[in-house]
Image (cartoon, rainbow, N blue to C red):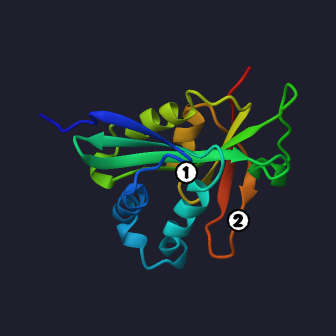
Amino acid sequence: MEPRVTDLRHFQHGSLPEDFRQILIDVHADAYADQMDDPFHQRFAWFVDHWSAMDGFSCVVAYNADEPVGFAYGAPLAPGREWWRSTDYEPNNGYSSTYAVSEVMVRPQWRKRGISERLHEALLKERTEDLAVLLVDVTHPKVQALYESWGYTKAGEQQPFADSPVYAVMVKALQD
């Protein structure tokens, strides 16, 4: 029998378990094992600290028994600081708020089982923001196509850090 995800655990800013940071770092190290010599990927712990300290931060971690196999996390973006603002994207219907999906990550041996979609859906299920936004490395067109199949539209491109990849800015309406 093929192993399966047995549990999706939800975490929020202000109530994170002591080992939360290390769980995410370990999954990232496995998911990007072939790229850990890249300084951008070496700063992942900083990104975890940055995002998890934000008001409204939420995370969903998928487990097989006690083994974390993937996660998705994000937080609301401050008005005027939304990633889509660097593009020509114009939100419809009186936009008022954006939730940034910062990471969706699954360990390689667990990929192609629908886990990333389950994590993404669980992360956004209770969100009250009007829009979701995420960034996808432009050198990964299959990942971009996957997000498009989940209702995202490419709004433009940006490079948020000098040593980061160029990303496609993907936007999805959460509220009609």
Across and down, in percent, residue 102 comes to 59, 51
Q: CA distance from mark 2 to mark 1?
A: 19 Å
Q: Residue at x 41, y 63 (%)?
A: 25
Residue 115 figure quarter: top left
SS of the residue at dot 1?
Answer: helix
| Residue drawn 85% across the image and 50% down it | 80
Percent position of residue 143, x then y: 51, 47
Q: Is residue 58 above or below residue 18?
A: above
User: Along the line of sight, which residue is nearer the eye, 8 or 17?
Assistant: 17
Instruction: From this view, report whether residue 134 is shown above or below residue 159.
Output: above
Q: Of the two numbered discs 2 and 1 on the same chain, state the one appearing first in sequence.
A: 1
Residue at image coords 48%, 74%: 42
Determine which of the numbered discs, if any, sits on residue 121 in the image: none
Amino acid marked by disc 1: Pro
Evaluate whether residue 52 shows in this view: yes
From the top left corner, tell me how far across and down residue 66 is, in percent. Answer: 24, 45
List the residue tagged with mark 2. Answer: 160
Q: Nearer the viewer, mark 2 or mark 1?
A: 2
Q: Nearer the viewer, residue 133 or 80?
A: 80
Residue 137 visible? The answer is: no
Residue 141 numbered mark, or none? 1
In-image side of 55 versus 19 (left or right): right
